[in-house]
Image (cartoon, rainbow, N blue to C red):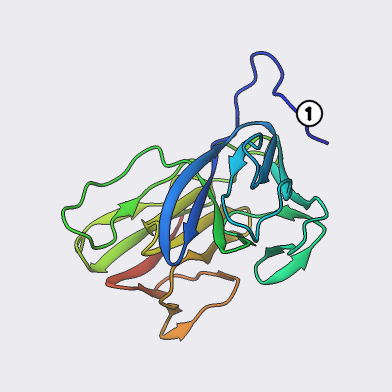
Amino acid sequence: MARSTAPEGATAMPYKLIISKDDRVLKEHLLPAGQTLVGRRPHNDLVLEDPTVSGKHAIIRVQDDEVEIEDLGSTNGTYVNGDPIARQELQLGDRMVIGPYRISLQLQIQDAWANAGSAPSVMPTYFQETSRGVLGQQQTAFIEITAGPNAGRHLPLTKVVTTIGTPGVGVISLTHRLDGFLLAKVEGEDPVTLNGQPIEGSVKLKDGDKIQMASIGMVFRLEQA
């Protein structure tokens, strides 16, 4: 179980919450190691000011590379990916609902490709593994951008997790695991399609798969070392 404060000298995991309401992104909230109290009252670490949110609504705990959320007996409940929960471990991209707020768990973006205008941009994101071990080097991959503001560019998938998109518009994640690469939709109203079919949950990618998110068209390229 996570402690309320991180040990001296420890580095907090680069997790963040993106909080939306009425289809509008309100703010980002960095998640430190330890616990984050969520509720309506001002003593909480994350204050959500709405009468449908309980004064002490939920608690989010971060320890190493694990994140969990626990409902604290709130009146209207806490939901993860549409289901009411009492206590649940969270995965990158999970979407929580507390009152009228939609909250997405993401990684802190370290770098971004600048892009003029309001169209989605491509944003590589780095996540340091702490307990799953070093990924094998048997596979290398990249995303070929075929449509959108960055058409013609290649995005090497050298990180454990790479996100593509803009919060509030649409975001997908590509996760490098020992057995391959997984695609998941993180947020956005428009469907994300793989080879013309909307995706649900996480799907394993193969060389040549075509991904479409809003105005961004992509092809997944896999190379054997």
Measured along the vertical axis of the image, is residue 146 above or below residue 153? below
Q: Which residue is mark 1?
A: 3
Q: In the picture shown, does residue 16 fall above or below 23?
A: above
Front-most of 12 and 74?
74
Q: Residue at x 66, y 72 (%)?
A: 82
Q: Residue at horizontal 41%, vertical 86%?
A: 196
Residue at far front of view: 51
Identify the residue at image location x=69%, y=40%.
37
Q: Position of residue 9 (x, y in %)?
A: 64, 14
Q: Is residue 117 left or right of residue 105?
A: left
Is 86 on the left or on the right of 106, as rendered?
A: right
- Residue 2, horizontal then vertical, whole percent: 78, 33
Q: Is residue 105 above or below residue 130?
A: below
Picture coordinates of residue 98 (x, y %)?
64, 59
Q: Nearer the viewer, residue 160 or 62?
A: 62
Quarter of the figure with residue 73: bottom right
Q: Position of residue 200 (x, y in %)?
A: 57, 77
Which residue: 28% across, 56% down? 121
Left or right? Give the position of 201 relative to 58. left
